[in-house]
Image (cartoon, rainbow, N blue to C red):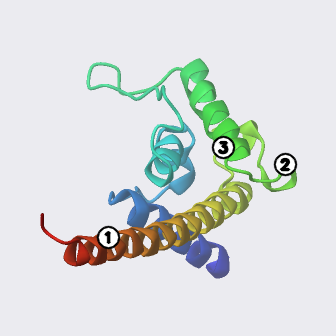
């Protein structure tokens, strides 16, 4: 039981760190409407999920249909990010607050996001090298062109 509490705490902290927002004690309750999960995906890859149903001050509790749409949007975004079907949890796991099954899915999303950012850094380094070479060549040409 102590391991489960510690594991849930670490899992929650990784989400808190990414979203820069604190989560309540009951992690399953905080994630079961799908809002934070959708925000996590959009934080990792902006505009992946275009519509996120969020509670308002007037209606602080989302309907089950809106929660389900958020959860399905999250799982669809996970598929688009390349998370294998075997690593995806079921919508009912999220809606019922089964954090243990959700953890694997979130781990895979975070792993894919880290791989994508590493790939992006590699492309940027290649572009930077190309840019420096072209600018150096232009400078050499400019310095060696005789004035008429």
Q: Is residue 112 left or right of residue 46?
A: right
Residue closer to the observer: 58 or 40:
40
Circle 1 residues within 10 Å: few <14, some 14–19, many ≥20: few
Q: Earlier in the sequence, mark 2 or mark 1?
A: 2
Pinpoint residue 30: horizontal percent, then vertical percent.
48, 47
Q: CA distance from mark 2 to mark 3?
A: 16 Å
The residue labelled by disc 2 is: 85
The residue depicted at 38 percent of the width and 56 percent of the height is 19
Q: CA distance from mark 3 to mark 1?
A: 52 Å
Pinpoint residue 122: horizontal percent, then vertical percent.
54, 72
* Mark nearer the viewer, 3 or 1: 1
The residue depicted at 52 percent of the width and 63 percent of the height is 120
Q: Earlier in the sequence, mark 3 or mark 1?
A: 3
The residue depicted at 40 percent of the width and 56 percent of the height is 24
Pinpoint residue 125: horizontal percent, then vertical percent.
47, 73
Q: Is residue 103 left or right of residue 32?
A: right
Give the label on residue 80, or none. none
Q: Is residue 16 visible?
A: yes
Give the label on residue 94, or none. 3
Q: Is residue 81 left or right of residue 22?
A: right
- Residue 46, quarter of picture: top left
- Residue 69, quarter of picture: top right
- Residue 134, quarter of picture: bottom left
Label 2 element class: helix
The residue labelled by disc 1 is: 135
The quarter in which the N terminus is drawn is bottom right
Q: Residue furthest left?
A: 148
Q: CA distance from mark 2 to mark 1?
A: 47 Å
């Amino acid at each position: 039981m102590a391991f489960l509490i510690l594991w849930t705490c670490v899992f929650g902290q990784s989400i808190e760190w990414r979203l820069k927002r604190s989560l309540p004690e009951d992690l399953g309750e905080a994630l079961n409407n799908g809002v934070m999960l959708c925000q996590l995906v959009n934080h990792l890859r902006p505009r992946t999920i275009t519509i996120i149903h969020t509670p308002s001050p007037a209606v602080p509790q989302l309907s089950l249909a809106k929660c389900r749409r958020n959860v399905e949007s999250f799982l669809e975004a996970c598929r688009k990010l390349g998370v294998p079907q075997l690593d995806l949890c079921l919508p009912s796991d999220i809606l019922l607050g089964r954090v243990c099954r959700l953890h694997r899915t979130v781990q895979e999303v975070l792993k894919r996001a880290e791989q994508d950012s590493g790939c992006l850094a590699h492309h940027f380094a290649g572009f930077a090298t190309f840019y420096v070479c072209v600018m150096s060549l232009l400078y050499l040409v400019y310095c060696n062109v005789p004035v008429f």
